[in-house]
Structure formats: structure tokens, C-alpha cells
Amino acid sequence: MLHRAGFIGLRISELRRRNNLSRTDLAEKINCSSGDILRYEHGLAVPPLAIILRLSLLFGYPLEYFYSEDPEPDPDPDSSSPNHP
């Protein structure tokens, strides 16, 4: 079982690659350094909640996606809400 930093890092790496972004591109989009992205993806650091929020907004995934072991939650954050029409 992966530790939290490693699991979150895998999610970040997966989304970055799916969206054909370099670490530098992603870093610019979420206002951090490419070194930070490298540390997050390799599980050497846990991104602060502010970074996770930016990733969530950028990629259109709910915050829970970065912490959940579900293989592929719904990318639309509003569609999982019980109040969503």
C-alpha cells in the first residue's frame, strides 16, 4: 500500500500525462515550481491543500479524487452531488 504522498503523487502524474503537460507546464498553470511537481509525483512531499485545490479546478476532478483509492471517480465535481439535477 502506498503512503499518502505517493498515492497523491501518482494521481498528479497520471493527470499531467493524460493532459500532455510537462512538469513545467503544470507548475505554471498552478503557480508552483517544476521542482515541486517532481517532489509531489515522486512522493517526496505532500502538496498543500491549496495546490490540490488548484489541480482539482484545472483538471475538473473533485478533491476526493486525490485522496480516494477509487480507480476513476466522475470528473465532473457537481455530478456526484445528491442535489445535482
Image (cartoon, rainbow, N blue to C red):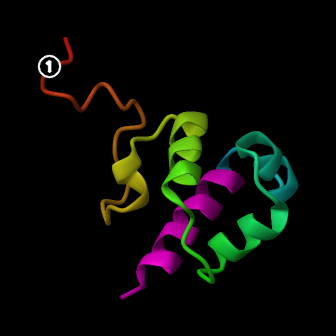
Q: Residue at image x 61%, y 36%?
A: 58
Judged left or right of residue 10, residue 34 is: right
Quarter-of-image position of residue 32: bottom right
Over which residues does the magenta segment extend?
Answer: 1-17
Q: Is residue 83 above or below residue 26?
A: above
The total of numbered circles placed on residues is 1
- In magenta segment, residue 4: yes
Q: Residues within 10 Å of mark 1 (few under 14, many from 20)?
A: few
Residue sitting at the far bottom: 1
Q: Residue furthest left?
A: 82
Q: Position of residue 3 (x, y in %)?
A: 42, 85
Residue 2, image x, y percentages: 42, 85
**In the depicted structure, whether residue 83 falls above or below residue 64:** above
Q: Position of residue 25 (x, y in %)?
A: 84, 47
* Residue 20 falls left or right of residue 13: right
- Predominant SS of the magenta segment: helix
Between 80 and 18, the one lying in front of the other is 80
Q: Amino acid at mark 1?
A: Asn
- 43 with respect to 21 (left or right): left
Q: Position of residue 44 (x, y in %)?
A: 63, 83
Residue 46 included in the magenta stretch of the image: no
Task: Give me the residue at 64% from left, 71% from top.
Answer: 40
Left or right of 27 in this view: 66: left
Q: Image height check: is 47 above or below 55?
A: below
- Is 76 situated above or below 17? above
Q: Secondary structure at mark 1?
A: loop
Residue beneath the point at 76% across and 46% down: 31
Residue drawn 57% across the image and 65% down it: 47
For the N terminus, the image quarter is bottom left
Quarter of the image where the C terminus is located: top left
- Tag 1 residue: 83
